[in-house]
Amino acid sequence: MSDKDTSPTPSPAPPLPTGPPPKVTNRGRSAGPTASSNSDSTDIPDFEFYGAPHPRGVPPLTEFLDISGVDMMRRPDESNKVEHHTMYYNSDNLIVRRAQEFQVKITFDRPYDSARDKIALEFVIGSSPQYSKGTYIPVFATKERQSSWAGRITHTSGNEITMGITPAANCIVGKYHMYVAVATTYGIRRTRKEKSRDLYILFNPWASDDAVFLDDEREREECVMTEMGIIYHGAYDDIAERDWNYGQFNYGVLDACLYIMDRSEMPITNRGDPIKVTRKASAMMNSRDDDGVLVGNWSGDYTYGVAPTSWTGSTDILLTYASSKMPVCYAQCWVYAAVFNTFLRCLGIPSRVVTNYFSAHDNDGNLKTDIILEEGGRIDRKLTKDSIWNYHCWNECYMTRPDLPAGFGGWQVVDATPQETSDGMYRCGPASVQAIKHGQICFPFDATFVFAEVNSDVVFYSRRKDGTMEPVKVNRTHVGRMVLTKTPGDLTRRDITDQYKFSEGSTEERTVLEKADEYGCNREKSNPPLADVDLVVPTLEVSVGDDFELSVEFINRSNQQRTVDTYISGNMVYYTGVTRSEFLFRDPTVEIDPNQTVKELVAVKSSSYMRHLVEQANLNFIITGKVQETGQIISTMKIVALRNPKILVEVSGGGRVNEEMMASVQFTNPFTFSLESVYIRMEGPGIMAPKSKYYRMIPGGSSLTWTEFFTPQRVGTTRMIATLDCPDLRQVYGQATVTIKP
């Protein structure tokens, strides 16, 4: 054996290839890609041979039944759309709901003979239809042969038959194509693909077998069929409302909703499950992870888009997203909730927009909102990081929850506003409202987060000089003060707080909080003694630009004199509770005789706050103090929502279908300064598509009138709504009720 080393000499690694990487496919992993686009489809041949094709093409088929016409019965006044509650959809195609029979008329070249003629209606969805996946469904006319969708012949007349088809209660929701097929000796003869035979199948809250069945006609009418909504905002003790046109029946909206699911690459096979659909759509309504529908913006700078306060409805947003394939700018919580509501109602899932007043954004799940005070009782702005939203809007949708124990179906919270991630994406829900009320926050999805939004404690800590902190006051009733939604069939608000929580201080409430603690929600257990001095700030009604007086009442409930070192701070805040700037600060020392009340009056000049205004014009006054004799901390918070001027909307004309009418918007600038870059928007469900107008400047004290003509297309009572928006003045609304006769 030689001593010479014969091992191979290592060679340098080959250089990495340049240029674009190869396209990653499913090759080697699966037989084909997962069908995830409702817009993709496969053409099925109009003649399909049994076995090998005939060498000379299609053989003569004169002895077999031939199809000469197909009527989808898709007009709004025909039985299909009327009985399926889809007559308002502005679409030329048939739109029906699952678990309910619809009719199709078929004309042959001779009378149909059930003894010798074999026919089927074939429904396909997606790019690779398969029977086993529920994306290819043949429906047969005879009782002897049936598939997952029931079929029967309901009427025969000469060469024409009417066939009834009942889609399965759990079938895929989306856009199908229908073929009529006839079996021959050689193969299957079928109709050619035509767009007129495309049909949409939706969820069905009228069918008891459907997972979204809602057995309350008033709720169904409101939460599926109503286009005009009311969204509540403002403050708990000064509630404001704005109209919103959901427009779920408008032209193109249904296709836009299906495009959203396509854009998410949601498998077609998952689109019959309302749990999966709502969870996926919750993520797709915001653009944070997946270039979804809306870009959130709370900054006040909306230069490259539409201010959230300017929108009047969902139609423009959804159609813009579907056509541009780009997220739409901009949104805040009520816009996310309103557009999500349109998506849900359009697909047939009962839904409503809900507003929670004093909504805690609890990102660590400890059910506490911490406010840090200096030893003297003044708020430490640097250390106080938690915020409480003046209000927050989310959605509730109605469905069964077979993944949860019995009793937790019904209304479910879904929230598209990007606050915290859930399973790695910005989304929330569906979370059972019943689970939240009973403290069962271990159940999916995101019940812990929603529970904190309505149940957090506000804890005031006193920070000593050595850095340690001691809880000095706990307010257990401030957060989740009231939960509102629109009353079904009425224009009034409905308080549904009791659906989320038991009454404060009740035995049931304590049991729920103990249950939540078992699942890891660590509430503040200490109970600092209550101070014997109370603070009260009466509710104020103040218009933008007004000077006003803030009255702070100190009530001494003891038999001894009390002296309070007080800090009164006025802050301009976004509705999310985030402070923009402090415009007022006072630190009076107040002396109160035993069992007496003292009022401290604070003058607030418009000049001090006007230059700091943010779009929803919220003034947040925080009053804290330390009682010299006892060392106890007292505090209160008051939101003053400044009232904006109104715009006047007037509608005139015949008031009949297909007769031209006129809508006018009138506005007077009440300020001494000019309003610049002013946008006005106007629309009305069933009567006028969204329109907008731009004004470069409206001088102080001057007025404008904008007039538009429109032709109503639908009988009934609706509203014309308008908004005015500019950098110096946000959230200006007006509306007029319109009744259209035949």
Image: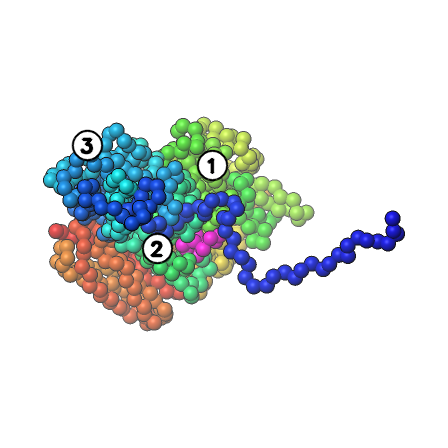
Please state the horizontal and vertical placement of residue 378, each as a whole percent of the image: 56, 51
Contact, mark 3 vs mark 2 (Cβ under 8 Å): no
Residue 292 part of the magenta segment = yes
Give the mark nearer the N terminus: 1 vs 2. Answer: 2
Depth order, front residue of 646/515: 515
Q: Considering the numbered disc 1 on the image, is that residue within a helix, a strand or a loop?
A: loop
Judged left or right of residue 537, residue 696 is left
Query: Would you say residue 428 is visible in this rendering?
Result: yes
Figure check: 72 above or below 603: above
In the current view of this chain or complex, which residue is farthest to the front? 55
What residue appears at the point 41 percent right and 32 percent down from the top-left corner?
Answer: 402
Which circle, 3 or 2, is nearer the viewer? 3
Judged left or right of residue 299, residue 409 is left
Q: Considering the numbered disc 2 on the image, is that residue within a helix, a strand or a loop?
A: helix
Q: Which residue is mark 3?
A: 115
Report the span colored magenta: 285-296
Q: Which residue is mark 2?
A: 318
Q: Which residue is mark 1?
A: 444
Figure check: 152 above or below 712: above
Amino acid carrying label 2: it is Leu
Residue 175 part of the magenta segment = no
In this rendering, the count of numbered labels is: 3
